[in-house]
Amino acid sequence: MRYPSRSRLSTHDPNLKENMSEKNDTESKDIQWPLWEVFTQPRDGKPHEHAGSLHAPDAEMALENARDVYARRKEAVNIWVVPSDQIVASKGEDAGPFFDPADDKPYRHPQFYSVPRASKRRS
Amino acid sequence: MDEESKKEKFQERIDNGETIEPKDWMPERYRKQLIRMMSQHAHSEVVGMLPEGNWITRAPSLRRKMILLSKVQDEAGHGLYLYSATETLGASRQEVIDQLLEGKAKYSSIFNYPTLSWADVAVIGWLVDGAAIINQTMLARSSYGPYSRAMVRICKEESFHKKQGYEMVATMADGTPEQQEMIQDAVDRWWWPTLMMFGPHDDDSPNSAELIKWGVKSKTNDELRQSFVDRHVSEAHEVGLEIPDEDLEYNEETGHWEFGEIDWDEFWNVVKGNGPMNKERMKSRREAHENGKWVREAAEEYARKKRLAKEKAS
Ligand SMILES: [Fe+2]
Ligand SMILES: [Fe+2]
């Protein structure tokens, strides 16, 4: 069984990516299952956190594998698995301009303001 | 930006202690060196299951059997964290694994020694996992984000590996004369190969300086080896075991244990594939992969049938 080569969250170098998909097409040797990113919720009330990735033929088995690989010691009370090619990410460190709009708005922070200091009420 | 200024800026980020993430620009050689190092590390975890796995069915008690099973399963997990981290550099999992199965990839030389008695399982946990902790605690601060995060995860699990080993070492060292003899014999056989795990002397380690410059490593092979010796000599003495090294001597001034020269001919011989168990390990690894084929096929078929049933229902 063969899977088409998939664009992935982490393949970033355009040259490398080309080389690799070319290779997959010609050699038809890559029989890896789809790649899934795993997010684990460490405790009730906490947000999910990226734990790593794994290969699995479908979502159900991806969840079971994620449990065995990333939560052998109760590291999670809940797990998300997401097909890696479904994740859209902003660019890495050279994508500064993308975050520029937040650069010149100090008035969004409480430190920007000076207010009179209210004295503590005395009984 | 041209290549040179990109490289300068990259080095600046490293020197500032910043973490490099998969989508960041990195020199091609940084990527290649990391793929080499991380995939070798992943292979070591996977091949490392074999010497100990060999003893699971012959564990002396149910308690020891459960512990060993769980440790060996952890090592499989370590391999998977690391393969996953290696993939973030653009390496294909399939290619990386094929390199191991085809005998083209390296893994830690320590796993090419045989496990002759149950005492070896104790000593591997104590010395080999003890050495791994020293190396991996350093790598948990590595400049490459996915590698360092995998190491943090692994280090948490390694302390159990070492402690269960040292517990067994202490129990046997305090046991019958036969048990004491067994455990000392295992220490005698594993001590030197464990020292070799840290790799050649700094002068003979061409990759070291570069990896330190890039913040992948922060200590040299010899520095790591020294902290291993300091820690484990005192643990050996604590339970009345001898270290098989006539030159071992405590230096009051430096506060370190000085030790004898490693047999580097033996080291290179094992690295080149001529250790006592190299062929056996590769044979077992290939057989395990072959024998897992039906499981992979069944999983695919199961996924296919479920997909079909779902399509029909809708
Ligand atoms: Fe490990
Ligand atoms: Fe371990």
Image: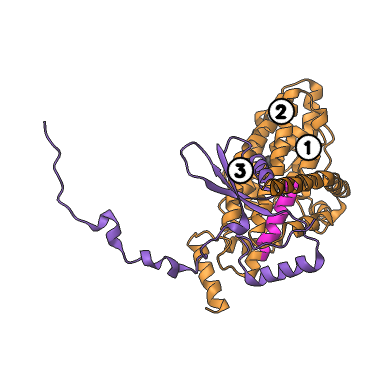
User: Furthest residue to the top?
Assistant: B176
Q: Which residues are magenta?
A: B32-46
Query: Would you say residue B19 is visible in this rendering?
Result: yes
Classify 10 Å Cα crowding around label 2: few (below 14), some (14-19), many (20 and above): many
Quadrant of the rendered structure where residue B211 is? bottom right
Vertical position of residue B144 compared to residue B45: above or below: below
Instruction: Please state the chain letter of the residue tagged with numbered disc 3 in the rendered image.
Output: B
Query: Would you say residue B227 is visible in this rendering?
Result: no
Q: Identify residue for label 2.
A: B168
Of labels 1 and 2, earlier in sequence is: 1
Question: Which tint is chain B?
Answer: orange
Among the chains pictured, the one given purple colouring is A
Distance, label 3 to label 2, CA atoms, is 20 Å
Q: Is residue B38 magenta?
A: yes
Q: Identify residue for label 3.
A: B155
Distance, label 1 to label 3, CA atoms, is 19 Å
Residue at image position (68%, 55%) is B38
User: Looking at this view, is B136 or A13 the one in front?
Assistant: A13
What's the amino acid at mark 3? Cys
Vertical position of residue A59 compared to residue A77: above or below: below
Quadrant field for ligand 2: top right
- Circle 2: element type: helix
Q: Nearer the viewer, mark 3 or mark 2?
A: 3
Of labels 1 and 3, earlier in sequence is: 1
Instruction: Please state the chain letter of the residue tagged with numbered disc 1 in the rendered image.
Output: B
Quadrant of the rendered structure where residue B30 is? bottom right
